[in-house]
Image (spheres, rainbow, N blue to C red):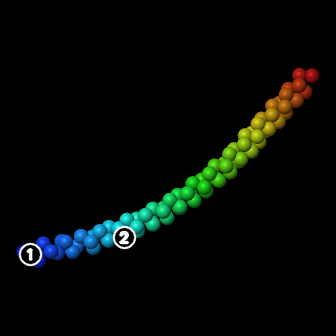
Amino acid sequence: MGEERSKPEGVVPELSKRVDDLRAEMNARFSDIYSRLNHLETEINELRGDLKKNFRWMVGLIVATWALIISMWVTVIMAIVK
């Protein structure tokens, strides 16, 4: 029985070192994950900017198209009325 009690005492420093190693490995993995997430965030922000530009172009084209259609119909109606 004396030997069984001495074994756990020798294991504690080994477990402590293993826990520290695991903690360091987890920190390294999390820092890698954080850098990947930051990269994704940057890419998403760039895509949002591109979408805003494209949306403005689409709205401008739609407004211009409607203005042309309305002016065309006004011209046609004025030609018919005269």
Give the residue displayed 45% in from the left and 62% down from the top: 30
53 vs 11, nearest the viewer? 11
Q: Residue furthest bottom?
A: 3
Which of the labelled discs sits on residue 21, or is there none?
2
Q: Counting residues from the N terminus, which is met first, the one under dot 1 or under dot 2?
A: 1
* Viewer can see residue 28: yes
Give the residue displayed 85% in from the left and 33% down from the top: 72
- Residue labelled with disc 1: 2
Which of the labelled discs sits on residue 75, or is there none?
none
Q: Residue furthest left?
A: 1
Q: Label 1 sits on what residue type?
A: Gly
> Which of the 4 quarters of the picture holds residue 39?
bottom right
- Vertical arrangement, residue 60 with respect to residue 9, above or below: above
Q: Residue furthest right?
A: 82
Residue 61, image x and y in percent? 77, 42
- Vertical arrangement, residue 10 with respect to residue 36, above or below: below
- Vertical arrangement, residue 60 with respect to residue 1, above or below: above
* Viewer can see residue 69: no
Tell me the quarter of the image containing the N terminus. Answer: bottom left
Compared across the picture, whether 16 is left or right of 80 comes to: left
Tell me the quarter of the image containing the C terminus. Answer: top right
Compared across the picture, whether 20 is left or right of 58 comes to: left
Give the residue displayed 43% in from the left and 64% down from the top: 27
Residue 35, image x and y in percent? 53, 61
Residue 21, image x and y in percent? 36, 70
Residue 53, image x and y in percent? 71, 47
Which element type, helix, strand or loop, lies under badge 1? helix
Q: Label 2 sits on what residue type?
A: Asp
Compared across the picture, whether 67 is left or right of 81 comes to: left
